[in-house]
Image (cartoon, rainbow, N blue to C red):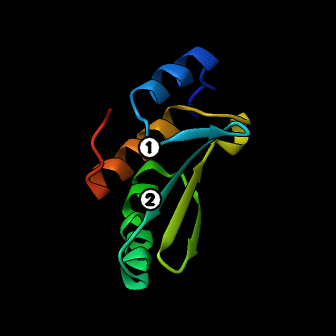
Amino acid sequence: MRPRRLTDQEVDGWLAAHSSWRLVEGHLVSDWHLPSHREAAQFVIDQVPIADRLDHHAVITLVYRDVRVELWTHDRDGLTELDLAYAEALDVLTGRPET
């Protein structure tokens, strides 16, 4: 069973604790600027096990050294626990501290 859509209050509370993420048109969005194109491409590859484990997939844009990740749950037309878990796993993967 797919998770329920989160309330605005739940999303706002999560965002308050994760300052590297922002809400853009109902989607969680975060950007990484990496030292090289190779490292940016490796980041995209390294996140695949997270997507596979969660059976949830992000929209990822790679432009030279910059990576943008956009998360939302399509079949809920909004954010769910899957999106928050994915974002938190990416922060762990990249060593981002919570705020």
Q: Amino acid at mark 2?
A: Asp
Closer-to-camera residue (3/35): 35
Residue 4 placement, left or right of 81: right
> In percent of the image, x 49 and y 32: which residue is there?
81
> In percent of the image, x 68 and y 34: which residue is there?
78
Closer-to-camera residue (22/82): 22
Within 10 Å of disc 1 (Cα), the crowding (few <14, some 14-19, many 20+) is some
In the rendered view, would you say 54 is above or below 25?
below
> In percent of the image, x 59 and y 23: which residue is there?
6
Per the image, the residue denoted by label 1 is 20
In the rendered view, would you say 78 is above or below 34?
above
Residue 76 placement, left or right of 11: right
Q: Position of residue 2 (x, y in %)?
A: 58, 34
Q: Quadrant location of the N terminus?
A: top right
Residue 3 placement, left or right of 93: right
Disc 1 versus disc 2: distance between alpha carbons? 23 Å
> In percent of the image, x 39 and y 70: which residue is there?
34
Q: Position of residue 25 (x, y in %)?
A: 73, 39
Secondary structure of the residue carrying numbered label 2: helix
**Most distant residue in the top direction:** 9
Per the image, the residue denoted by label 2 is 52
**Most distant residue in the bottom direction:** 38
Disc assigned to residue 73: none
Q: Quadrant location of the C terminus?
A: top left
Q: Amino acid at mark 1?
A: Ser
The image quadrant that residue 88 belongs to is: top left
Closer-to-camera residue (62/86): 62
Within 10 Å of disc 2 (Cα), the crowding (few <14, some 14-19, many 20+) is few
Instruction: Decide which of tag 1 and tag 2 comes sooner along the chain.
Output: 1
Mark 1 in CB contact with mark 2 (< 8 angstroms): no
Secondary structure of the residue carrying numbered label 1: loop
